[in-house]
Image (cartoon, rainbow, N blue to C red):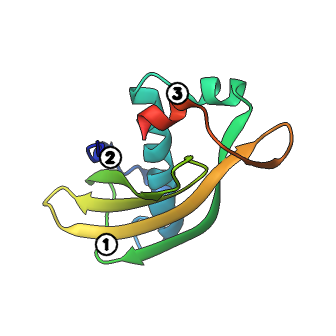
Amino acid sequence: MEKAEFSKTYEVIWADTDPNRHMRHSVYNDYAAHTRIAIFQDYGLPISEIAEMHLGPILFREETKFFKEIGLSEQITVTCKVITMRKDGSRWTFLHDIFKQNGDKAAQIIVEGAWLNLKKRKLATPPKELMDVV
């Protein structure tokens, strides 16, 4: 069964902006990363519990396409959806879309990653609890 797309809404703060008075390029990726972690939190599996499993997410590739500027105090919605995953859950690809309050797509981010065993410092297969979330 396919999971529904997850989304989270944020307000752009002063620290997110650059001298051009719009959201800094790296902040788009920060909001996407926070949204990925929020999925687990919202499904009752906070990152602290994932760390107790000696697992952490790592990225191999992150690609961002920018479409529209986002300004200070704008509300944005970041969506997150798994678009590919190995059957064992060890590697995955997330798609994020960032929308302005008026519905315009401001950016799209594709992230490819895996789970890292934090003790062995090697790629790992996640337990069922993680697989149930995504």
| Residue that protrudes farthest toward the right in the picture | 120
Q: Amino acid at mark 1?
A: Glu
Residue pictured at 50% horizontal, 73% vertical: 63
**Residue of label 3:** 129
Cα distance, mark 3 to mark 2? Answer: 31 Å
**Residue of label 1:** 69
Label pair 1/2, CB-CB below 8 angstroms: no
For label 2, the crowd category at 10 Å Cα-Cα, with few meaning under 14, some 14 to 19 and many 20 or more, is some
Q: Amino acid at mark 2?
A: Glu
Work out whether mark 3 precedes mark 2 in sequence or the reverse, and give the earlier one. 2
Looking at the picture, tell me which residue is in the foreground, 56 or 97: 56
Label pair 3/2, CB-CB below 8 angstroms: no
Secondary structure of the residue carrying tag 1 is loop
- In the image, which disc is placed on residue 11? 2
Work out whether mark 1 precedes mark 2 in sequence or the reverse, and give the earlier one. 2
Measured as percent of width and height from the top left, residue 70 is found at 31, 65
Cα distance, mark 1 to mark 3? Answer: 38 Å
Residue pictured at 31% horizontal, 72% vertical: 69
- Judge from the rendering whether residue 89 lies leftward or rightward of residue 56; answer left or right: left
| Residue that protrudes farthest toward the front in the picture | 87
Q: Name the image quarter holding residue 61.
A: bottom right
Q: Name the image quarter holding residue 39.
A: top left
Would residue 133 be visible to someone looking at this image? Answer: yes
Residue pictured at 42% horizontal, 41% vertical: 134
For label 3, the crowd category at 10 Å Cα-Cα, with few meaning under 14, some 14 to 19 and many 20 or more, is few
Using the image, determine if residue 89 lies above or below residue 68: above
Looking at the picture, tell me which residue is in the foreground, 23 or 52: 52
Q: Amino acid at mark 3?
A: Glu
Measured as percent of width and height from the top left, residue 96 is found at 37, 59
Work out whether mark 1 precedes mark 3 in sequence or the reverse, and give the earlier one. 1
Measured as percent of width and height from the top left, residue 62 is found at 55, 68
